[in-house]
Image: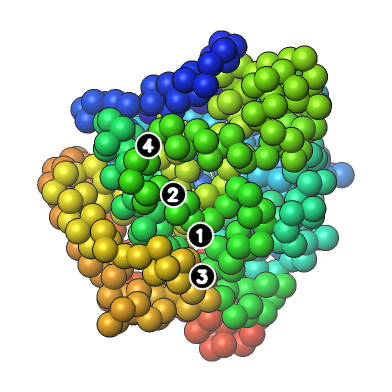
Amino acid sequence: MSGPNSESAQPIETRQQLIDYLASGVREPAQWAIGTEHEKFGFHLDTLRPPAYREADGTGIEAILQGLTQFGWEPVTENGHLIALNRDGASVSLEPAGQLELSGAPLKDLHDTHCEVAQHLQEVRTVAEPMGIGFLGMGFQPKWKREDMPWMPKGRYKIMREYMPKVGSLGLDMMTRTCTVQVNLDVGSEADMIRKFRVSLALQSVATAMFADSPFTEGQPNGFRSYRSHIWTDTDPDRTGLLDFVFDEGFGYERYVDYLLDVPMYFVYRDGRYIDASGQSFRDFLDGRLPAYMGQRPSIKDWADHSTTAFPEVRLKKYLEMRGADSGPWNRITALPALFVGLLYDTTALDAAWDLVKDWSIEELHALRDGVPKHGLSLPFRNGTVLDIARQVLAIANNGLRARARTDANGLDESIYLEPLIEFAEAGITPADRKLQRFHGEWGGNIDRVFEEYRYR
């Protein structure tokens, strides 16, 4: 798995280069790494309002990024604005409304992931708490309206902000009011990629149910367990959802390239600025006929950028990216990579996971995708519920992690990081259900309690 900022400026002369770019991520199993990303909402501890990029009192998101440089993070600027930080293959960056994201370095095991997350959250607390700012991990902003959310000064987001309302009604909510946790995992060959893609795509809705943690909108229950997941159904149909073709005979890198070529563009990045190419065709760009940049042809870096503007449930870059989970408390940040490392990085576990899903029909996969955001683990599936599937999946992942036999200083293997998911599965509820119970019980219908009780400490 390559780290950030490693893409080439090599010009594209043939379609095969696009295929080769994706295939260049193939690694030997001994080199497989784990890259974990998570996003979180900032809020002022006194008012609970999200911090702006730059506050009148000198605090805000920019000040937090600046403060983090004391820990060796290198600043990244755009048009004079500090927008990201890099350190040792990891980055800290900003989502559109200032949600703070850690894109972790490629690491060898989940113990390293756990330490990376803990260190990051400690660094953020050290900087943000003296400013009166805390952070919350949930899938959807539980209190504030869309118009209450600030916007960060990034050119990419300006283009997306203007384009989103043309293609869906919830795209701006996706940008400003959602947070996720994701994991990036390597593949060993095209055949390995295909099997991992199919297994993880089939099980992504099950993961969504296990991590469902976005049951509130503007202070009240919204009728969903994962409203974040629901939002993706009305964001942009050209670049979201299940990819049915992944299950077709003959699927491989070439077919995914065709899919990406059909995804409308957002932008071209040149000389430090974003050129608006929203809705235009990368195929035209290949031919030097892109209206926004006539006569110019793309580089491999442009192709890499374009691949990040597709938002399916599982995304293929040089590696596979699991995109179905709501963000949550810090122990569930490591649980997400634990789930998919356990399923995909052990051959016996991968075989067992494939046996579980191989006869699921496309119609059943869509029924899961459509039903899980509202019903979570209680959604009926075949002769049982998604909860029954989740328990089987957790057992397979647990066995896969034990087989990896990667132990920490106390001799514990990576299966310990599944414990938060196993706890919910044993209780038969989602994280959203637990918050709803507290909202209707001890919180007395006061959503403000979620910020105090669930913020990162």
Residue 226 position within the rendered picture, expressed as x and y whole percent measured from the top left = 53, 68
Helix, strand or loop for disc 2? helix
Sequence-first disc among 3 and 2: 2
Inter-mark Cα distance, 1 to 2? 25 Å
Inter-mark Cα distance, 3 to 4? 26 Å
Residue 274 position within the rendered picture, expressed as x and y whole percent measured from the top left = 77, 27
Q: Which mark is residue 370?
A: 3
186 or 399, nearer to the observer = 186
Rendered position, 39 above or below 301: below
Sequence-first disc among 3 and 1: 1
* In this view, the mark in front (3 or 4): 4
Identity of the residue drawn at 78% across and 46% down = 163
Rendered position, 340 above or below 279: below
Left or right of 85: which side holds 373?
Answer: left
Inter-mark Cα distance, 2 to 4? 10 Å
Inter-mark Cα distance, 3 to 2? 18 Å
Sequence-first disc among 3 and 4: 4
Q: Which residue position holds label 4?
A: 252
Mark 3–mark 4 contact, CB under 8 Å?
no
Sequence-first disc among 1 and 4: 4
Inter-mark Cα distance, 3 to 1? 16 Å
Q: Quadrant of residue 358?
A: bottom left
Quadrant of the image containing the N terminus: top left
Q: Which residue position holds label 1?
A: 326
Q: Which residue position holds label 2?
A: 245
Q: How many marks?
A: 4
Left or right of 408: which side holds 156?
Answer: right
Query: Crowding near pointer 2: few (<14 within 10 Å), some, many (20+)?
Result: some
Mark 1–mark 4 contact, CB under 8 Å?
no
